[in-house]
Image (cartoon, grey):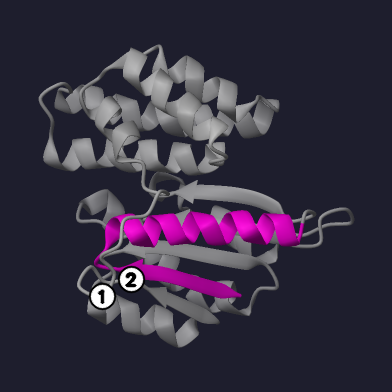
Amino acid sequence: MLYLFYGSDVEKTRTKAFEWVAKARVKEPNLAYVRLAREELTSAALEDAALSGGLFVKRLLILVDDPFQRSEVDEEAESILEEHIDALAASDNAIVVLAPKLPAAKAKKFVAKAKVEYKYDRAAMREEARGFNSALVNALAVRSREKLWLEINRALRAGDAPEMLHGLLHWKARDLMERGGRSWKPEESRKLSLDLISLLQDSRRKGLDLSESLECFALSI
């Protein structure tokens, strides 16, 4: 089953997608949750997303995070995702595609296959949402380890899921790669993005606490 979150209001779209994921995990605790960053999109990963299940985990919840951007690498990821759209739509697993600013031509393809679509355009949705933590991403942008550590802890105490915080940080890392920033050189922002991917993968494979890993990451920038 395919669920599509898109629209010109990037902050609102991201917030609502992570809220939906959080509610789904509460409603169905046995769901195994995996977030796939754009750099992790491969045919094998998407085939697993569509087909995987098991004795103890009947269904998966997969969040495909922001797969559509402008670069040669991203074009390959986009192509892979579109090639698997029919299998993802037919799957018993819940596949959430989070795609802010999805181009209209691509949106039509995904809307046609989605079980439910959620669209948040900036003109229609102007209210502020807590889920997009501007203080968090700004702390990363200015490379303030103390401020970032503080904002991570504040968000965790307020009940934000560590997966959501990781998603925001990785989104900002990719934003720094594409737009640049005063505090990050191009090669540093790329390494930042890769480090965040590794952090999430290590958390999954080694059973590490993602909250603690995020705190350590904040103090390492």
Say if residue 48 shows up in the picture: no
Name the residue rendered at 58%, 57% in the picture: 21
| Amino acid type at image mark 2 | Tyr
Q: Which mark is residue 124?
A: 1
* Residue 146, placed above or below residue 191: above
In the rendered structure, the answer to whether residue 215 lies left or right of residue 141 reads: right
Q: Main secondary structure of the magenta part?
A: helix
**Magenta residues, as a range?**
1-28
User: Of the residues shown, which amino acid type is indicated by label 1?
Assistant: Ala
Left or right of 9? Residue 169 is right
Q: Is residue 30 above or below residue 149?
A: below
Tell me the quarter of the picture where residue 122 sits.
bottom left
Element at label 1:
loop
Q: Position of residue 199 (x, y in %)?
A: 50, 27
203 horizontally vs 110: left or right = right
Q: Which residue is farthest left?
A: 182
Question: What element does badge 2 sit on?
Answer: loop
Q: Is 2 inside the magenta-drawn segment? A: yes
Residue 57 in percent (x, y) is at 81, 55
Q: CA distance from mark 1 to mark 2?
A: 7 Å
Visible residue check, residue 10: yes
The quarter of the displayed image where residue 128 is located: bottom left
Q: Are marks 1 and 2 in contact (CB under 8 Å)?
A: yes
* Residue of label 2: 120
Residue at (13, 34) in percent of width and height: 180
Viewer-side residue, 39 vs 182? 182
